[in-house]
């Protein structure tokens, strides 16, 4: 399953790159920018297991970043697990679009972007392909998590650290 998750992350990175390039002037995202790196983010267990396996020493002996920001940030605001960061972190900062149910139960397109990246052409004027569309990759990740009858439980990233935890096991949390 780890290889399939890595492949999914590669596909996400490949799909996000042209959108990031298109918005290069608008995006303030760079090493040390951590405005989107907030506490309380939950990831599916399949992603938490990769982080736990690939960063076992950090999780066992390292200290999480103080509460309020992602536990995996270092003192300079850089991600300590960048190579193995979860899906949600791979698309942060990009203009996002998704379908939501409107008042009359008809689908309504919604859009959002990090406030730091809000300058430039208004989101509502961007063509759909200039935004990251939420849905398809989330569904693929959901299906990967559900394989073998696994529940669609999420794990809060901070809970992976052994420091201050009763155990370093993954604990289900609400989705983010």
Image (tube, rainbow, N blue to C red):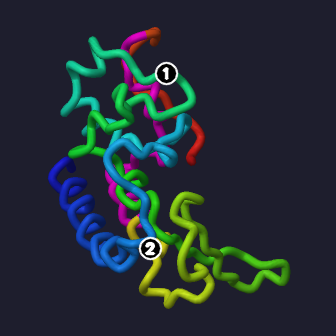
Number of numbered tags placed on the structure image: 2
At a point 35% along the width and 56% down the height, the residue shown is 90
Q: Residue lying at the far left in this picture: please name it.
A: 3
Secondary structure type for disc 2: strand
User: Which residue appears at 46% of the width and 34% of the height?
Assistant: 70
Q: Residue at x 53, y 77 (%)?
A: 120
- On screen, residue 67 above or below 138: above
Q: Secondary structure at mark 1?
A: loop
Q: Quadrant of residue 80?
A: top left
Along the horizontal axis of the image, is 42 left or right of 74? right
* Mark 2 Cα shell of 10 Å, populated few (<14), some (14-19), many (≥20): many
- Near mark 1 (Cα within 10 A), the count class, few <14, some 14-19 or many ≥20, is some
Measured along the vertical axis of the image, is residue 82 above or below residue 10?
above
Q: Nearer the viewer, mark 2 or mark 1?
A: 1
The part of the image, by quadrant, that contains residue 142 is: bottom left
* Residue 56 shown in magenta: no
Span of residues in magenta: 138-163
Query: x, y (%) of residue 158?
Result: 45, 27
Residue where numbered disc 2 is placed: 132
Residue, x 21% and y 50% (percent of image)? 1
How would you classify the magenta stretch by its main secondary structure? helix
**Dot 1 corresponds to which residue?**
66
Q: CA distance from mark 2 to mark 1?
A: 30 Å
Q: Indicate the position of residue 60 as horizontal and vertical percent values.
A: 28, 14
């Amino acid at each position: 399953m780890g290889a399939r998750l890595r492949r999914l992350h590669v596909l996400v990175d490949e799909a996000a790159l042209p959108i990031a390039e298109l918005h290069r002037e608008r995006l303030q995202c760079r090493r040390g920018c951590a405005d989107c790196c907030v506490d309380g983010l939950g990831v599916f267990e399949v992603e938490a297991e990769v982080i736990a396996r690939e960063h076992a020493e950090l999780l066992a002996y390292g200290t999480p970043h103080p509460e309020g920001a992602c536990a995996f940030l270092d003192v300079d605001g850089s991600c300590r697990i960048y190579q193995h960061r979860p899906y949600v972190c791979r698309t942060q900062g990009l203009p996002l679009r998704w379908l939501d149910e409107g008042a009359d139960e008809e689908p309504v397109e919604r859009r959002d972007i990090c406030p730091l990246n809000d300058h430039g052409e208004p989101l509502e004027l961007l063509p759909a392909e200039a935004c990251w569309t939420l849905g398809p990759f989330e569904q693929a990740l959901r299906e990967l998590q559900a394989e073998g009858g696994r529940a669609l439980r999420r794990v809060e990233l901070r809970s992976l650290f052994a420091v201050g935890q009763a155990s370093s096991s993954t604990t289900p949390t609400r989705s983010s």
